[in-house]
Amino acid sequence: MNPEAESTASTQLPRSPLPRHVAIIMDGNGRWAETRGLPRLEGHREGAKSVRDVVRAARRSGLEALTLYAFSAQNWARPSEEVTGLMELLRDYLIDERPEIIENGIQLRAIGDIDRLPALVRAPLDALSTDSAANSDMVLNLALSYGGRESIAAAAQRLAKRVAAGELDPGDLDVEQFGAEMPTAKLPGLDLLIRTSGEQRISNFLLWEAGYAELYFTEVLWPDFRKEALADALEEYQTRERRFGLTGAQIESGDLAP
Ligand code: FPP
C-alpha cells in the first residue's frame, strides 16, 4: 500500500487499541514435522523457537500479558516419548531463556495442575517464577497440565469449601466471585485468543476467560508462527469492534463496556 492510501485508510478506520492480554493455542507442531518426514518431537523443537520469537515480539509490542497453551491436562495421554520430550523442551526453555526473561522485566507465571509436572520442569519453573516475581513489564503465563474445565471445577471446589466453612453465602457466588477465583484473576481480561494450524476450536483452553475475547484463527502452523504472524494477528484485532453485548451506537457514544 502506498503511504497516501495508507493514511486515507487509517483516517477512515479508527484503530482500536492493542490487546492487553493475548493467549495462543500453539497448534500444528506434529503436522509441521510429519510433512517434512521428521519425528513429531522435531516439530515441538521448532515450535519452541517460535515461543522464543513470539515472547520477544510480544514484549516489544507492549502487551501486558501473554498466555501460552504449552501442555494441556489431556496431553498426558500422548505417547510417553512425546510427553518426556515435551517436558525436556520445557525445562530447556526455562533454563535457556531465564537470563532474557529476567533482564527484560518479564514476570513468569504458570497456570494448571503444576504439582503433576516432573521435578525437571518444576525446579526451573519455581525458581524462575520466584526470581521474576517483581518484574512488571509483561507477564508470560504458561498453561501447563492445564484444562479450562478443570480450572473452573477447581475454582468451584475452593468456593464451595468457603461456603461450607460459613465464610461465604451461596447467594454471593456470582460472576465476580468466580472470576476472582480463576488462576488468571490478576491478569488483564483476555482480549485476543489466537489458534494456529487451521483448527477452529478452543480445546478446553481458558473457557471462562474467553467469554468476550476476540478469536483469531490462522492456517499458519505453530513452528512457522513468528513475529510477523503475531503482528498480523494484532493488526487484525485492531480492526475489530468489541461490543461486550452492547450496541454499536452505545459503544460509539462512549458507554462503558462491562
Ligand atoms: C500442539 O501441536 C502443541 C503442543 C501439544 C505442545 C506445544 C509445545 C511447544 C510449542 C514447545 C514447548 C513449549 C514451550 C513453552 C517452550 P500438536 O502436536 O497437537 O500438532 P498436530 O495437531 O499437528 O499434531
Image (spheres, helix red, strand yellow):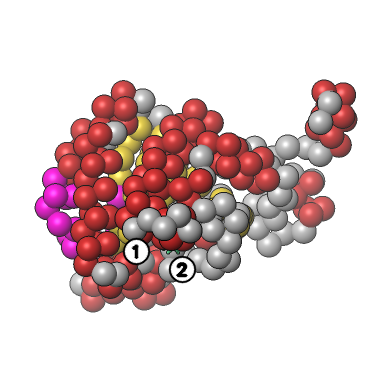
Q: CA distance from mark 2 to mark 1?
A: 9 Å
Residue that appears at 35% across and 32% down:
106
What segment carries the magenta color?
110-123
Q: Quadrant of the N terminus?
A: top right
Residue 62 pos. (x, y %): 51, 31
Tell which of 174 and 47 is nearer to you: 47
Tell me where residue 248 sits by quadrant: bottom right
Is 225 left or right of 181, judged from the image as shown? right
Residue 149 pos. (x, y %): 39, 71
Name the residue type under label 1: Ser
Is 218 left or right of 203, judged from the image as shown? right
Q: Are marks 2 and 1 in contact (CB under 8 Å)?
A: yes
Residue that appears at 70% across and 55% down:
243
Residue 20 pos. (x, y %): 53, 41
Element at label 2: loop
The furthest residue to the front: 37
Residue 203 is labelled as: 2
Residue, disc 1: 72
Residue 96 pos. (x, y %): 25, 34
